[in-house]
Amino acid sequence: MKSKLLESIELIFKRRLSRKTGWGRNEVLIEYQASVNEALTKLIDLII
């Protein structure tokens, strides 16, 4: 069973990835990191 955090990261990443075309490896890694950051920020906001 996936954790809610991992599910959130996956969902955000897929959403961000679907908006882009013609990407290289670096751009995908940047968007993945941004997705992780967004998911963690949402989690922290829920905790605080």
Image: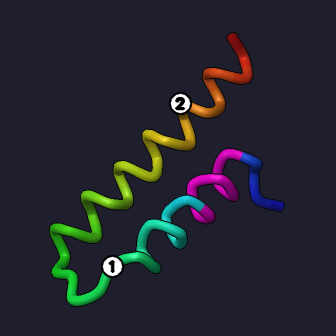
Bounds of the magenta span? 5-11
- Quadrant position of residue 5: top right
Q: Earlier in the sequence, mark 1 or mark 2?
A: 1
Tell me if residue 7 is in the magenta stretch: yes
**15 over 20 or under it: above or below:** above
The amino acid beneath tag 1 is: Lys
Percent position of residue 32, x then y: 38, 59
- Quadrant position of residue 29: bottom left
- Quadrant position of residue 39: top right
- Which label was assigned to residue 41? 2
Could you give the CA–CA distance between mark 1 and mark 2, rounded to whole angstroms? Answer: 23 Å
**Which residue is at 28% across, 70% downward?**
28
- Residue labelled with disc 1: 20
Circle 1 residues within 10 Å: few <14, some 14–19, many ≥20 = few
**25 over 9 or under it: above or below:** below
**Which residue is at 35% across, 51% downward?**
33
Tell me if residue 33 is in the magenta stretch: no
Position of the C terminus, as image quadrant, is top right
